[in-house]
Amino acid sequence: MSLTPPERVSVDSITIRRWVDADAAPLHALILANLDHLRPWMAWIATEPLSLPEREAKIGEWTRRWDDGVDFPYAIADGSGDLLGGCGLHRRIGPAGLGIGYWVRGDRVGQGIATRAVAALTEAAFSIEGVDHVEIHHDAANVASRRVPEKNGFELVGESPDEAVAPSEVGVDVTWRRRRTDV
């Protein structure tokens, strides 16, 4: 067991890998090209568009948070290295659990990319000492996000009122959980 997840995991034709400084320009272009696709569901998109120097600083922040063991953000790339989206393991649900977040570029939605990334992240999370469960949270209106935990064998824990922070959200948080003992 380790205190951090692996920096790189490959599954089928995709690679989930730690963000690096050289990703700033391609990530910048990807987000700018997908603003309309991401805006309905991603609260963080409200701060976009960032400038390229701000994007570089953001990757630097992700590096620090990884090194501090707080968050583990990953790029999702295809076999040729092209960015498909992002995902991550986040310490926001208590000391024994990690939250999983993910997004995929608009022209690659529906191809199982998020599903495969979550499968890899779940395995990576359970390689971390002290982690006994992972959770996925999404707004009830986000049907596409719902399919990802369903396909990965997560248990529906419940729904609770929450603040709607992105334009298409209805303010109902849906929580899914997978325990180490489930794998």
Image: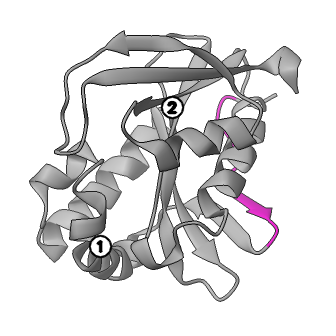
What residue do we see at 72% from left, 15% from top?
A: 132
Measured as percent of width and height from the top left, residue 117 is found at: 65, 54
Q: Is the magenta region chiefly helix, strand or loop? A: loop
Q: Is residue 51 left or right of residue 97?
A: left
**Number of numbered discs visible in the structure rendering:** 2
- Residue 7 magenta-highlighted: yes
The kind of secondary structure element at disc 1 is loop
The kind of secondary structure element at disc 2 is loop
The magenta region covers 3-12
What residue do we see at 26% from left, 56% from top?
A: 58
Q: Is residue 130 left or right of residue 28?
A: right
Query: In front here: 43 or 170?
Result: 170
Say if residue 77 shows up in the picture. yes
Which image quarter: residue 16?
A: bottom right
Quarter of the image with the C terminus is top right
Instruction: First in sequence, mark 2 or 1: give its number.
Output: 1
Q: Residues within 10 Å of mark 2 (few under 14, many from 20)?
A: some
Q: Residues within 10 Å of mark 1 (few under 14, many from 20)?
A: some
Measured as percent of width and height from the top left, residue 13 is found at: 76, 75
Give the CA separation, mark 2 to mark 1: 29 Å
Quarter of the image with the N terminus is top right
Q: Amino acid at mark 1?
A: Asn
Q: Amino acid at mark 2?
A: Gly
- Residue 172 magenta-highlighted: no
Residue that carries the numbered disc 2 in the rendered image? 69
Measured as percent of width and height from the top left, residue 20 is found at: 46, 67
For residue 19, above or below residue 40: below
For residue 97, above or below residue 104: above
Residue that carries the numbered disc 1 in the rendered image? 34
